[in-house]
Image (cartoon, rainbow, N blue to C red):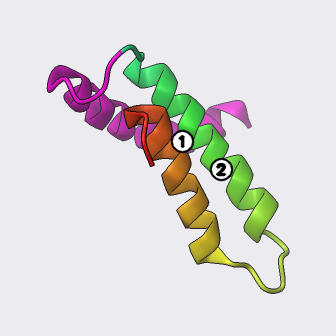
Amino acid sequence: MRRAWREFLDPVIEAHAAKIAEEVERGRIRGIDPERTARALIGMNVQYFFDELVDNPSPDVETTADALLVIWQRALYGRG
């Protein structure tokens, strides 16, 4: 089960880690490990999606996405 989950998530994490690393190289983001940060943020997304959207008869996808966007912006850039 763990291997299947990793095979599902790792490509997403790797893609986001690469983008974060680019931002670090450009000096737009400082003081973070791109891979660990991507893994933590993606993990948060997955858990929050489950909590907010799964089995919810009236899911508010836009509000859920907006909340996560603010968290990502603050975590990566210190603003949002």
- Res 51 quadrant in image: bottom right
Q: Give the residue type that dot 2 points to.
A: Val
**Residue name at image x 32 percent, y 19 percent:** 30
From the viewer's perspective, tell me whether residue 24 is left or right of residue 1. left
Nearest to the observer: residue 78 or residue 41: 78
| Residue 2 highlighted magenta (yes or no) | yes
Tell me which corner region of the image, top left, top right, bottom left or bottom right, holds residue 55. Answer: bottom right
Read off the residue under disc 2: 46
Question: Which residue is the extreme one toward the left?
Answer: 26
Q: Position of residue 67 (x, y in %)?
A: 60, 58
Identify which residue is drawn at 25% across, 23% down.
24
**Badge 2 or badge 1: first in the primary sequence:** 1
Identify whether 61 is placed above or below 20.
Answer: below
Q: Residues within 10 Å of mark 1 (few under 14, many from 20)?
A: some
* Direction from residue 73 to residue 22 in the image, left or right: left
Element assignment for label 2 = helix
The residues colored magenta run 1-30
Q: Is residue 71 above or below residue 77?
A: below
Residue 2: image quadrant is: top right
Q: Is residue 11 above or below residue 54?
A: above
Task: Provide the secondary structure element on which disc 1 rests.
Answer: helix
Depth check, front residue: 5 or 25:
25
* Above/below status of 64 relative to 75: below
Q: Is residue 13 magenta?
A: yes
**Other residues around mark 2 within 10 Å, as few (<14) / some (14–19) / many (≥20):** few
Residue identifier under label 1:
9
